[in-house]
Amino acid sequence: MTPLTNLDVVALAWFLAAWIGYAIAVEWLPQGRKSLNSLMDLHRETWMVRMLARDVRIIDTQITASLQNGTAFFASTSLLAIGGALTLLRSTDDILDMTQGLPFGIGATRLEWEVKTFGLALIFVYAFFKFAWSYRLFNYVAILLGAAPPPEDRETPDARIHARRTARLCEEAGRHFNRGQRAFFLALGYLGWFVSPWVFMATTAAVLVVMWRRQFGSNAQHAVKDDRFETSSP
């Protein structure tokens, strides 16, 4: 006997479709070139080109260290979240007894609760791998910064190739970091499933709207928008 109802399956399919569809729209479709993430990739490339002209590159190493520290924080937070999810699995009976008296009345069997909690743990495991790989990639970016040619050679073909290579690696590190953060955000929507499938679908949609707005309609996106994406006035 399956622990999930048909409505649960529909809600889970909606969650996965929202996650995958959003990732495709932001990372693969032409519309994604207007996203905040893509706009920041342009600035990463500008950063690496200007880095070549600096004789002392302490500021570049400091920026990279700051990016590494932020990624390490989220990686360690992912491990704590995984531990919390596993604790929920170990304390299933106590949690079910406690939730029975809540006003909104979470009604779930032991197996159903464990399946949902295991899914939550999987989301945080995915996030950990993304943050950990992003941290490693930022380490590689730091190495490439150290291997950059001197300022007097910045106009040579090798220097331009090195700048593009470093920028691409930095973009890849940022892409994996964004995927890890996306998992964190969607985990908040996933929590709605512990209440009901309808709440699950509603919270997933709410998180999706917030993420979409931040990528395409936030003040931050407008602040870094490149002129090539501006539309002419009628």
Image: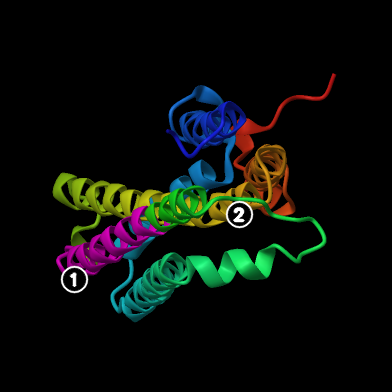
Q: Position of residue 63 (x, y in %)?
A: 40, 73
Answer above or below: position of 129 versus 229: below
Residue at (66%, 70%) from the top-left corner?
A: 98
In which quarter of the view is residue 78 placed?
A: bottom left
Q: Amino acid at mark 2?
A: Leu
Q: CA distance from mark 1 to mark 2?
A: 44 Å
Choose between 7 and 224: the one closer to the eye.
7
Residue ID for mark 2 = 191
Q: Which secondary structure dominates the residues rendered in magenta?
A: helix
Residue 148 sits inside the magenta stretch: yes
Answer yes or no: is residue 219 visible: yes
Q: Position of residue 199 (x, y in %)?
A: 72, 43
Q: Secondary structure at mark 1?
A: helix
- Packing grade of label 1 (10 A; few <14, some 14-19, many >=20) is few
1 vs 2, front mark: 2
Range covered by the magenta-colored residues? 124-150
Residue at (69%, 54%) from the top-left corner?
A: 106
Residue 146, labelled with which disc? 1
Choose between 214 and 109: the one closer to the eye.
109
